[in-house]
Amino acid sequence: MSTSAALPVSFAEQFSSYRWVILAVLWITYVVVFLARLSVGPLAPFLKEDLHITSAQVGLVMSTAAFGYMLTQIPVGWLVDRIGARWPIAVGEILAGFCMFGVAVSPSYAWMLGLMLLVGMSCGCLMPATTQAVVVWFPRRERATVMGIKQMAVNAGGIIGAATLPAIALAWGWRAGFGSLGIVAIAIGAISLVFYRNPTAAPATEATGAAPRVALRSLAANREIWLVAVAGLCMNWVEMAMIGHFVLYMKEALAFSVVAAGAMLATAETAGAFARPGSGLVSDWLFRGRRKPVFLILAVMTTAMCVVLAAAGPSLGRLMFPVVFVFGIGGVGFGAICFTMLSEFGGRQGAGTASAFGSTVGMIGSIVGPIAFGHIVDISRSYEMAWWSQAAIGSLAVVALLFVRESLREI
């Protein structure tokens, strides 16, 4: 089989061994996305000292990148469903690289904000593109597992950034940290352009010709996509509120040291990282391609752990570790199965748009959840009510999923 990047892939080749090369490309590009998006945290002390900015201003840099990421989801999803994932992946990576170079030479904080918005927008090209690529390259029996492996790159990006960027900044300054990410992003973008190829068409349409493209308005009117998107919003709400406040909760309410609290949070993140491909494997093989039962189990697990934290948090003692671990499996590890459901409800011709639409809705939870949790703590002067609110939001995800009607047809 030819490896020329200019040639599309035939029907016979589509589910060949080359799909594992595609997975490698998707994984490394997604690692770079989250290296860029999460780069501010590891470099925050250096930014504060050199630019004379506050912690709130550092947080605004991160929020600006997240907002840019959200802005491009739907338009790029629409584009990917029309031209394929190859060019959006490559262009998104390369533009993100050049924007990171811009951040490295920013003359002021205002310039940094503007450039981080562009970094977020460039990285935003990758979520719908890589999700659509999984749908068109992998059969249903493998799809959720592969989506989980791809989503593990989120954790990998955060870990690599935390391990390397502070050392680079100590040796050569924070600007070198952003500059190094720019080089990596441009290089990976070029590699993806060489090795990623768009399939010519879907096997399901081989006999009848290419299927018509799916309009955004028809996807936005799809009851199942809305239900999964709302469930994703609720789960994002619970996840990001927990990640944003758990260390403070452990320190203030349970008298843990910051180091011990951080280790406990890392436990949740690690559990979630392995739950992403693990839940996909369970869906693909144990449930024979059914996604709803797996997502429902993860949502119930998350909600139950929030109830435990609300009712018995201060008295858990050593039981806190298994509670946090189970929370991580459900509350951090749900993303892959959620994106798989969204993309499959969109179909092969609308996978990018459907996943982008669901991601955009879901990011509302990521933005509002930490604010709401902190506000409840401030008003009630207690974490108990905040955890009960988390349980209520998790219950909404469970209810939304109960009404989802899932089809097992191959797409």
Image: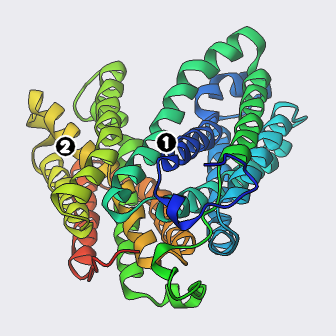
Residue type at the position of mark 2 = Val
Is residue 117 visible to us here? no
**Residue closest to the eye, 51 or 289:** 289
Mark 1 and mark 2 in contact? Answer it, CB < 8 Å: no
What residue do we see at 55% from left, 78% from top?
A: 349
Q: Which residue is mark 1?
A: 154
- Secondary structure beneath disc 1? helix
Residue 223 in the image: state x and y as whole percent. 38, 87
Q: Earlier in the sequence, mark 1 or mark 2?
A: 1
Left/right placement of residue 317 relative to residue 110 reads left
Label 2, residues with CA under 10 Å away: few <14, some 14-19, many ≥20? many
Give the vertical position of 398 relative to 102 (above or below): below
Left/right placement of residue 17 relative to residue 52 reads left
Residue type at the position of mark 1 = Val
Q: CA distance from mark 1 to mark 2?
A: 19 Å
Residue 340 in the image: state x and y as whole percent. 39, 63
Label 1, residues with CA under 10 Å away: few <14, some 14-19, many ≥20? many
Residue 157 in the image: state x and y as whole percent. 54, 35
Closer to the observer: label 1 or label 2? 1
**Residue closest to the eye, 408 or 208:** 208
